[in-house]
Image: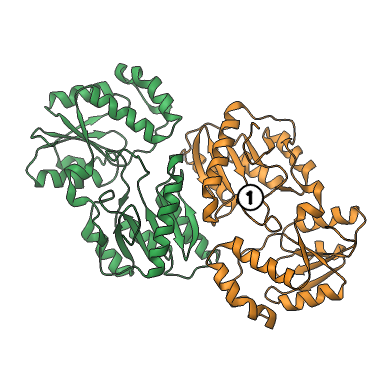
Chain colours: A orange, B green
Amino acid sequence: MLDGSTLAIICGGGSLPFAVADSVIGRGRRVMLFAIRGWADATAVQAYAHRWIALGKLGQLCRAMRSEGCREVVFIGQLSRPAVSELRFDWDTLLLLPRIARAFRGGDDHLLSHVGKFFEERGFNLLGAHEVAPEIVLRRGLLGRCAASSRDLADIDRGLTLLQALSPFDVGQAVIVADNHVLAIEAAEGTDAMVARIAEQRQLGRIRSRKGVGVLVKAPKLGQDQRFDLPSIGPETIERAAYAGLAGVAAIAGATIVAEPVRVATVADRENLFVMGIDAGGSRQ
Amino acid sequence: MLDGSTLAIICGGGSLPFAVADSVIGRGRRVMLFAIRGWADATAVQAYAHRWIALGKLGQLCRAMRSEGCREVVFIGQLSRPAVSELRFDWDTLLLLPRIARAFRGGDDHLLSHVGKFFEERGFNLLGAHEVAPEIVLRRGLLGRCAASSRDLADIDRGLTLLQALSPFDVGQAVIVADNHVLAIEAAEGTDAMVARIAEQRQLGRIRSRKGVGVLVKAPKLGQDQRFDLPSIGPETIERAAYAGLAGVAAIAGATIVAEPVRVATVADRENLFVMGIDAGGSRQ
């Protein structure tokens, strides 16, 4: 699947694109970063061979990738839904718009699948970040020294079952469960805002479970195209979870990106939180 | 089912207990309000025959209800989960605590069913507010002048299906869906906080759908004991929904309390929102 060509990394926001680039470079492959204007970190991108691109100009992007000799592409980094008024389209993108508009009504997964198909129709092979940079993927078991209690494991399983039930609705990838109670379900607000809400409610005395009880459970949506938008965990995730008084964080092994595993483990140990890679079928398989 | 005895109304917070009392009195039946200290509105309760009671003293409450000749009981009003440290128990409640503790682990529904059983075992008949005060129950169809568009109806149906999928998890009674996207799912934060979150995210430019798109859908949990905790809609619900830029509010006819239907309709008309009572099976039955 991986050929020797220069890997095109289309970079959204955050540090993940650079973790992926470092990993690929470390394995001796050339990369070219296509940094999305307004999203990619302009300072960090300087350290790599890169070109700036505009959202909404997919045709231009394809020509640029071709001229760099790229045949394989990875999409990585944050990319909130842009305001349509800020977008400037090229013709290729305009011709794709009716398909995008239909896809938007069906949730993001569908939109991304359509963008994926667009690249594939033009001869590019779209890969997942976990395929090109396996060392930034969460492994099964504990990351750090803290272990999950049997109550935590039960909370993880309840959270997973809930996420599976939500899957047909193309919504949230995370829930918080404490002592069998569902405290929060992520939708449009994103995981960080959801965890912050629990911290806030705890301060208001509205969370009944005591500090050190409760798990943040993250999972990709069933049927989600893992070449886009895999759940990710970073040191900030652990810090936020600690601030919200949780016992730990669980996510699907093999389908969650941990860009900085050593820092994640350090923060988790310091905050006395567990971080656990689990199977999609549950914590006790 | 309704006998002629004085109706015991156990009053939590908010205005609903008084709307129920007015409705029952208006039909010529005597009521006695048992106002929960720390929750019931101390000013409003003055206008009615009432006695103050303490949470955690169920035995005392039963004796008081018996001495007032009450055989039928309604539970109504807000009652957030109390901090256990603030509770003072009587013996009857203490003996019930192991059952309550087990029930707590299974979610609120189970807790309330146990409290319900406690009253029934002591010879009281526990009724739902909708049974004693049918005029404060949402009816099928529109309340106010604004109608739902076909997109709104589709959003309502998606929200209902999602709430049904969540039902086994004993969680939230409300979601917000806009143009087929699930924007928010209620868990521990409550409906008001969930709607406020969408208003906030809209101001931050993080909600893609334009103002006037999106529906707040409320439904009781499947299998929920309707003698407790029916969803309710008030003028503030409509105001919050308007502030969040929604098109309207839909809830289950016959299983939603609207304490002030005239004010709800007035606010909805002023804010150009629809308010709709729907069947549990969907908006188009």
Q: Nearer the viewer, residue B63 or A228?
A: A228
User: Is residue A200 among what the camera can see?
Assistant: no
Q: Position of residue A180 (x, y in %)?
A: 50, 33
The residue furthest bottom is A91
Q: Which residue is mark 1?
A: A220
Q: Nearer the viewer, residue A161 or B226?
A: A161
User: Along the horizontal axis of the image, is B66 left or right of A159?
Assistant: left
Task: Indicate whether B220 appears above or below A85.
Answer: above
Quadrant including the N terminus of chain A: bottom right
Residue located 43% across and 56% down the image: B159
Residue located 87% across and 67% down the image: A49
Task: Indicate whether A194 appears above or below A18.
Answer: above
User: Along the horizontal axis of the image, is B121 left or right of B101?
Assistant: left
Q: Position of residue B223 (x, y in %)?
A: 35, 40
Q: Chain of mark 1?
A: A
Q: What SS does tag 1 mark?
A: loop
User: Along the horizontal axis of the image, is A9 left or right of A236?
Assistant: right
Task: Indicate whether A60 appears above or below A222.
Answer: below
Q: Position of residue B248 (x, y in %)?
A: 36, 63
The kind of residue tagged 1 is: Pro
